[in-house]
Structures are given as structure tokens and as C-alpha cells.
Amino acid sequence: MLKVESIASGYGSAQALWDVSLEVGEGEIVTIIGPNGAGKSTLVNVLAGIHPAWSGSVNLDGVELTKLASHEVCGAGIAVVPEGRQVFPDMTVADNLEIGGYHPSVRQYRDETYERVIGIFPILADRGGQLAGSMSGGEQQMLAIGRALMARPRYLLLDEPSLGLAPVIVENIFEVLRQINDEGVSVVVVEQNVVEALQLASRGYVLEQGNIVKEASADQLLEDPAVRAAYLGV
Amino acid sequence: MTSTNRNTSLITLTIAVILWFMPTFRETLDYPVFFLLFGYTLFFWIAQASSWNTFTGFSGYFSFGQGAFFGAGVYAVAVLAVKRDWPLLLTFLVGGIVAAAIGLIIGVVVFRLRELRGEIFALMTLAVAFVMASIARVSPTIDGGQGAPVNNVPLPDFLGDFPTMIFRLGLIVATLAVIAAQWVQRSRLGWGLFSIRDDEDVAETLGVPTFRYKITALLITAFIAGLSGAIHSLQIGYVTIEDVFSIRVPLFVILMSILGGTKHWMGPVVGAIVVVTLNDRLNRAGFQEISDFITGGLLILMIVAVKEGLYLRMRTRPARTAIGFVAGLAIGLALGALDESLITLLAYGLGIAVLAVMLPLSWFARGRSAEAEAKVASHG
């Protein structure tokens, strides 16, 4: 279980997260939705260990992640797909995937994991020798997800996976997330694309101005008048 | 990415061994002593540029610290060998270690702070050289502002006379620098550094121990730069703060590496050979006052025209490179370059080869679309 308790964080004197608590159970798909500037990316960065928490705790199956160096967090079982894809553009697709399986704890399974990843994204095998930066946005997102999977995470954390992608590609990506979840990986999606995210997830949190203002099942949130008014424009 | 393997290093070592015996057969081959000194200058800059590139080129952290590492090496010899009578070879090693220690301090301080990426890091490393220069200036044990002579040190005689000795010492360090760069490029360390260059945060979340890798690479860079500086003190003869800590070393290694290309170990080597050869010939042709000006202008032109660096450009266009080189040699021969020196002829070959790969692609397109060319270029 990923248990986030009372996380506060920010930049200099600007506080971005005030008191964020949430839980993601084994095998769940959970979404965190919220408007621009709500603190979504800060939360992802704190969970990933690349931005320090001022206070609070992030606990993954008994391991306190806030105390780990950021390159050790992925060894604890959490992998991040950063916002805007962020593949290594000057490296080949194959090298990007190799680096995903970089952590000592998963290095021995690299070939096996690679087979699994290209089973999910066959296109990555076809494009193995191509520079990642020359691929289309959707392909780069697939690569970013594939690269995260190479770390054999139990929890996959995605920051706005739909950003800048055509609707049909988004659908495709979310379908893959469901498939990954079926294989036993818990998925946390941080999204502005509220409808898609809530259709994928079983539960959702609403993050506004650095606070969790609502937590409910995805169906409830889809029906929630406040959510509908704020995010769906109806 | 890793287009270098163990065989590359074996070839490098073989070339080094052959070069090692160059001075032995000087009488047989009948070439002037100047060749050895020119060779040393080449080795010095290859060592400096390659070592700089091992950290900066691979990791993307722009460092002006080369002057500080180089200076530490120079002054290690000037202080310990000259004033304290330490054995010369030992002071070389100390020069490398002192430089590495400075690199370690810079790294531990700067890499801890996430804010100090990018240009702040570059300025920090530049500041270190200024601080070191000030310390050397006020400290009578180091320099005291008077300068320090590095002659009359007992030279090890098993390496031969002075030109032979400096040639061989330079060769050793250049070989070390190049083999280190090759090793880094094909190792996990190099891989991690490349991912840091592309996106450090992402690399970190993927489990790349970025702090440790950056420190390791900076230590390699600093040690080799210091070692090379220590040997260079013998060549300088009289060490002054103004010369040692001038911007020349950090600036030239940057120019050479960017000109040759920073993504491959061969880039700085190519850059150093081109710049040293052209600079040397310009000086010899009587353009001393404006040779830096001309070199600088040429460099700007080349860097704009060949963004990925000469080496990768030459590799994707081997035919043009070869034809350019041979044409250059022919022009040189016709103009009587050989009457002056073999190096002049070499300069013609290099110069024309560089021009040939610089020329716009469309001139040689032969039906290949510009798009396809761009793709080839981007794949390097």
C-alpha cells in the first residue's frame, strides 16, 4: 500500500502543498485530478523523491520514501512517467528502455522485462534503433511508460499522460494502463483530462490549491455536481 | 550509442606505442626536433580537451574549471619539485591528486544543491580559478606574485633528452585521457552521464545515482587535467599566475571539444588536432598577433556550420572527408608546402577536409533529399 500522510511542500516561500493525504491500495487504479496550479506536479515530484517534502510521510509497504535518495526511490517499487514525456531525446529507443532497467534490484531481469514491455508496445521493438526525440508524441509517451515499466514497479505513477496527445491516442494509452493494471501493477494517474481519468480509475482525489478537497469513487465523482461544473463545464 | 569497444582502446594503445618510438628513430627518419615539440603540444591539448569532455561533454555540465585543475598541476611542480626538491615524477602524481581534490570539493558543494545547475555551475567553476589565482598571488610559499622558475629541476634521464622526454610524457597523459574517455563512453558511468545530459531529474527517478556519477566523472577530468598541467610546467619553464590561470586553457578546451563534437570521445581529439595544427601554422606564417583572431573566427564559422561537431560530420561523410584531405595535400604539394614542413602539408590536408565537410549539404546531395540528410546527421 502506498500511503501518503500530511505532505506539505513548496518552493522557497511559496507553499504548493498544504496537507495532502491519500492512499493507493495494491492493484488499484487511482486518479488525482485538479486544475492548473493545484500542486499536482509538485505532488508527483515529492512522491518520486525529486522534490523534498517539508513535512509528512510517503510510505510504500513500510518503506519511508521521503528518507531515500531520489535514485533509490525507484528501487522501492515506484516508477514515474514524468509530465511532457521526457524521454532522452538523444538516445535510441532501446537505450531509453535499457536505462529504465538501470536499478541494481531489477538489472538481472532486464531481458525478461524487456520482452514484457515490447509485448505491450510492439512498436518500441520496431523502433529500437531510432533516436527517441524523433518519434511522435504518442510514441514517446509509450516509450516513457515502457521505460518506467522496465524498473518492474509495483506502483506506476503518471503525470498528465494525456498532455498534448490526440484523443484517439489518449484512449489507446489509457487502454494500455488498464492492461498494465490487470497484470498487477497499481496505477496512479495525475490528470487534467478528468473524464478519461475517472473512466479509467476506480477512485479519485480532487486536489485544489494544495489540498485534497474531495475523495470518492470514480463514478461518484463523475456524477458530482461540483466536479461536473468545475471540470466538465456542465 | 556505444560505438566504441575494447578494440578501440587496443588500437589507441598500439598507436601510442608506435609514437613512443618516434624519437628513437629520429636520426633514421631524419625529421627536425621541432616535430617532437609540436607533437607534445598536440598531446597536451588532446589530454586537456579529452579530459574536459569526459565530464562536461558527456554530462552536459558546463565547466570552466579546467584552468583551476591545470593550474593546480602546474603549481604542484613549481612548489614541490622546485622549492622543496621532491622527486619530479612524484610531483606529477601530486599535481593530479591535488586537482582531483579540488574537483571533489567543487563537486560535493555544487552537486548537493539542485539550484546550481546550468549557468550557475559554469560560473562557480570559473570563480574557483580566480580564487586559486588570488591564493597563489598572496601566498609566498606558492608564488607570491613573483612567478616561479621551473628549470634546473633534475629531469629523469631514462626518458631521453628534453624534447624526447616531454614528447613521451605528453604521450602518456594523452593516451591515458583518451582511453579514460573511451572507457567512460562505453561503461555504465557514461550511460548514466548521457541520461543526465538529456534530463537529470528523469535519470534520477529511473535509479541513476546522478550525484555519484557526476563526482566520479569530475574526478577523472580533474586528475588528468592536473597531471597534464604538472608536465606542462616543464614546457613553460617560468610559471606566472597570469599565464597559468588565464582563460586560455578553459576556453581552448571548450572550443576544441565543441568544434570536434562533445558526444563522442573522438570529438575533442579531432578538435585538438585541427586547432593546434592550424594555430601553429598561422603562427609560423607570421600571423602571431592575429592568429588567435583568425582561429577564433574560423571556429565560430565551423561551429555554426557543423553543429554536431566535426568528428560525427566526418564519420557520416567519409568520402568527402577523404577527398578533401587528399585534395588539400595535393594543393599543399603544388604550393610547395613540403619545402617548409610536413606539418604545413598536414595543415593543408586538414584545412581542406574541414572545409569539405562544412560546405552545404545540397552541393553534394546527388539525389538524396535534404530531409534524409538531416536524419542521417541527427543520428550521428
Image (tube, helix red, strand yellow):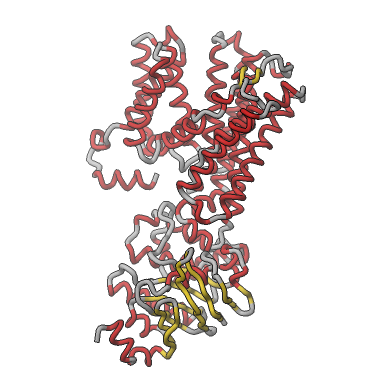
Where, quadrant-wise, is the C terminus of chain B in this rendering?
Answer: top left
Residue B353 point in image, percent of width and height: 36, 26
| Position of residue B297 measured from the top left corner of the image (x, y, whole percent) | 35, 27
**Which residue of the protein is positioned furthest toward the top in this rendering?**
B339
* Location of residue A63 by image quarter: bottom right
Q: Nearer the viewer, residue B80 or A87?
A: B80
Task: Give the left or right position of residue A41, taking residue A65 as reference.
Answer: left
Residue at left offset 42%, top offset 81%: A31
Residue A226 drawn above or below residue A189: below
Left or right position of A230 against B39:
left
Residue B225 appears in the figure: no
Say which residue appears at 58% left-offset and 35% top-offset: B68
Instruction: Report the label total.
Output: 0
Q: Identify the residue at image location x=62%, y=20%.
A: B146
Q: Position of residue B139 (x, y in %)?
A: 67, 29
Q: Quadrant of residue B284?
A: top left
Residue B324 vs B219, above or below: the answer is above
The residue at 46%/35% (across/down) is B254
Nearer-the-camera pick, B160 or B219:
B219
Where residue B34 appears, x then y in whole percent? Answer: 54, 12
Residue A117 versus residue B218 in the image, above or below:
below
Residue B54, quarter of picture? top right
B327 lies above or below A164: above
The reply to whether residue B210 is in sight is yes
The foreground one among B146 and B162 is B146
